[in-house]
Image (tube, rainbow, N blue to C red):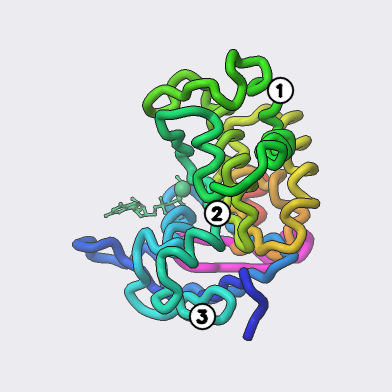
Amino acid sequence: LPEPGTVEFKDVTFGYPGAEAPVLSNISFTAKPGQTTAIIGSTGAGKTTLLNLIPRLYDATEGEILIGGVPLKELGREAISQNISAVPQRPYLFSGTIESNLRFGAQDAEEEELWEALRIAQADGFVSEREGQLESKISQGGTNVSGGQRQRLCIARALAAKPKTYLFDDSFSALDVSTDAKLRAALVEPTKDAAVIIVAQRVSTITDADQILVLDHGEIVARGTHEELLESSETYQEIVTS
Ligand code: GTP
Ligand code: MG
């Protein structure tokens, strides 16, 4: 069997219920633990849809997705939520405390582990400045934190769960350049044994990825490292220069 956390897409096609044309066609790739797989492509290319198939927000229409060699449909909801952490494109917080938000997926974590997740996510500073700190209240929809803070709290929540697979959907876009750089440097160590899949709009986020998949109209039109794609893919060159 492939290592736990490995994500395999085998000839996956997906169309939204009721829609005419598929949004994803014949997608095949493997995301291995210890590696970063980046997905890049223009708006509407199908990046979020592809990520959402992994925790089974939708099921593939054709083809198969396997985690650690086990077909998703055999894994069960619990195994999926225990092994996969997703930071969605529009990160959400639950009404409750910061702590209860962080403990979603990490019920048994020590408080120190929550702070460690906050430090990595560059969120410890603003949390420690809030009255009540971990006990500070998040209002419904998380409207009493900024978009960038919400994004970092969702990243901290994903880290606290210590999954084998991380899915980041454009998760660094609300951060300023310096916070973005610090956060991604801090992520290297805690995610080093996990399979990391990052959807990006900015190429700067993914130049050091182990493999980059270029998605265009629901198809993988090129794949390789940044250097390889600069040589081989016109679509990638367009993204880089846009
Ligand atoms: P950006 O996040 O804007 O960069 O785009 P993306 O690459 O993440 O594309 P996404 O996967 O969100 O959308 C791919 C295609 O599926 C687009 O044509 C969307 O209009 C369509 N789509 C997305 N969500 C839904 C949905 O819930 N229902 C239907 N019917 N179509 C959807
Ligand atoms: Mg998207």
The spot of residue 133 in percent (x, y) is 61, 21
The spot of residue 7 in percent (x, y) is 57, 71
Q: Is residue 212 in view?
A: no
The spot of residue 151 in percent (x, y) is 56, 34
Q: Residue at x 44, y 79 (%)?
A: 64
Question: Is residue 219 shown in magenta?
Answer: yes
Secondary structure category for the residue under label 1:
helix
Find the residue positioned furthest to the left. 18
Q: Is residue 31 in view?
A: yes
Horizontal side of 196 relative to 120 (left or right) equals left
Which residue in the structure is indicated by mark 3?
70
Circle 3 packing at 10 Å, graded few (<14), some (14-19), many (20+), is some
Residue type pointed to by label 2? Ser
Circle 2 packing at 10 Å, graded few (<14), some (14-19), many (20+), is many
Work out whether residue 203 or residue 61 is closer to the camera in this orientation and state it: 61
Horizontal side of 141 relative to 145 (left or right) equals left
Residue type pointed to by label 1? Gly
Q: Residue at x 52, y 52 (%)?
A: 86
Q: Disc 3 versus disc 1: distance between alpha carbons?
A: 40 Å
Which residue in the structure is indicated by mark 1?
125
Q: Earlier in the sequence, mark 1 or mark 2?
A: 2
Q: Disc 1 versus disc 2: distance between alpha carbons?
A: 23 Å
Q: Which residues are magenta?
A: 214-234
- Tag of residue 85: 2
Work out whether residue 72 or residue 96 is closer to the camera in this orientation and state it: 96
Q: Earlier in the sequence, mark 3 or mark 1?
A: 3
For the image shown, how many numbered marks are present on the structure? 3
